[in-house]
Image: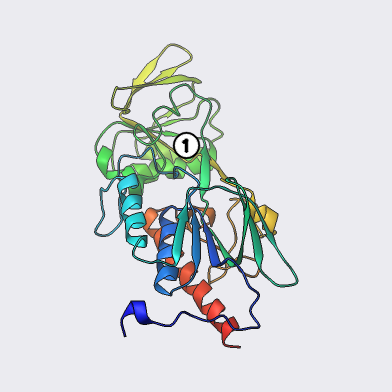
Amino acid sequence: MPASARRPFRRPTHIPPTDYDVVVIGAGCAGLSAALVLGRCRRRVLLCDGGKTRNAPSPAVHNFLSRDGIKPQELLQQGREQLSAYPSVELRESCVMQAERDEATGTFRITLDTGGCVTSRKVILATGVMDVLPPIDGMRELWGVGVLHCPYCHGYEVSDKPLAVYGRGKSVAGFALLISRWSKDVVVCTDGTAGLADHSRQRLKRHGIPVYEQQIARLVGRNNGELHSIEFADGTTLERAALFLHPEQQQRTDLAEQLGCYRLARSGGIRVDKRIQTSVPGVYAAGDTTPAAQQAVVAAAEGVQAGISCNEQLTREECA
């Protein structure tokens, strides 16, 4: 029987009526993947795209099998185009301002910034995080090219170049030792007192990684966004090709908090179980918004898992 002749799915009478089966909030790799799975399950899906993704400043996505080196926006555009083959999936350029769960029915009411509300049986949070960079001149301007966060994403491109690692305490020592896998010319810049234990200092010294504790005045970049040098407050400079750091992060939205999802205190990530469901029934989370490794391919995989879990739970409810 051709697709056009198939009888539409009829909702069982015991299922509360809603505008959509699932609202997916966030249209990065996680959200697009979740919507793709659900579209192929013939679910009524609203995918809300709130704007640029976290990796937008990066020149390329890496470690994504068959897409290694693709530009972030090109990858997302391909995903959006592929979703157009599934008529039950609707994409809106909208930010979700509020989400609330009806405890009586277990359904959700979603308020959009473009006006109006929609209802849904399930919600997938794929809103991601924001990086909170240190307030140093040049840090934000060079972010994604000369200032980097992930050696697995960007280390290969700066192999064997002079590199710096920014941070303090035990974590920066471990990070610098990791970066030394890509280059033997690595320094630690602590922008003030390092807070390093003797053991950490000895480890760095043993591997030839010096520690600069001067205050950083600014980062000097090249026209292409690469780092040229680090200028310290005492007037000295240090030529480096890139600087790595683990910035603080915060959730891009407070929707998880509105819905009452349990968050991990240390990372701020949304806790999920093996089905990618949060502590709130019917709410799933995928991508950088969870504590998983922050890689595009991992976000896509979590999105797939969230889509499958949603569909299977919806089916169980319909076939009760």
- The image quarter containing residue 285 is bottom right
Q: Secondary structure at mark 1?
A: helix
Q: Is residue 81 visible?
A: yes
Viewer-closest of 94 and 212: 94
Above-or-below relation of 235 to 169: above
* Residue at the extreme front: 5
Viewer-closest of 47 and 257: 47
* Residue at the extreme bottom: 320
Which residue position is annotated with label 1? 201
Q: Residue at x 60, y 82 (%)?
A: 317
Colour convention: rainbow
Q: Residue at x 38, y 54 (%)?
A: 296
Q: Residue at x 60, y 47 (%)?
A: 253
- Left or right: residue 179 compared with residue 118: left
Q: Picture coordinates of residue 161 (x, y %)?
A: 26, 33
Q: Picture coordinates of residue 42 (x, y %)?
A: 44, 74
Which amino acid, by three-letter code, is at mark 1?
Arg
Above-or-below relation of 126 to 50: below
- Left or right: residue 130 compared with residue 266: left
Q: Picture coordinates of residue 166 (x, y %)?
A: 45, 33
Above-or-below relation of 80 to 174: below
Viewer-closest of 218 and 41: 41
- The image quarter containing residue 40 is bottom left
Q: Is residue 264 visible?
A: no
Q: Picture coordinates of residue 62 (x, y %)?
A: 30, 50
Above-or-below relation of 271 to 199: below
Q: Residue at x 57, y 69 (%)?
A: 273
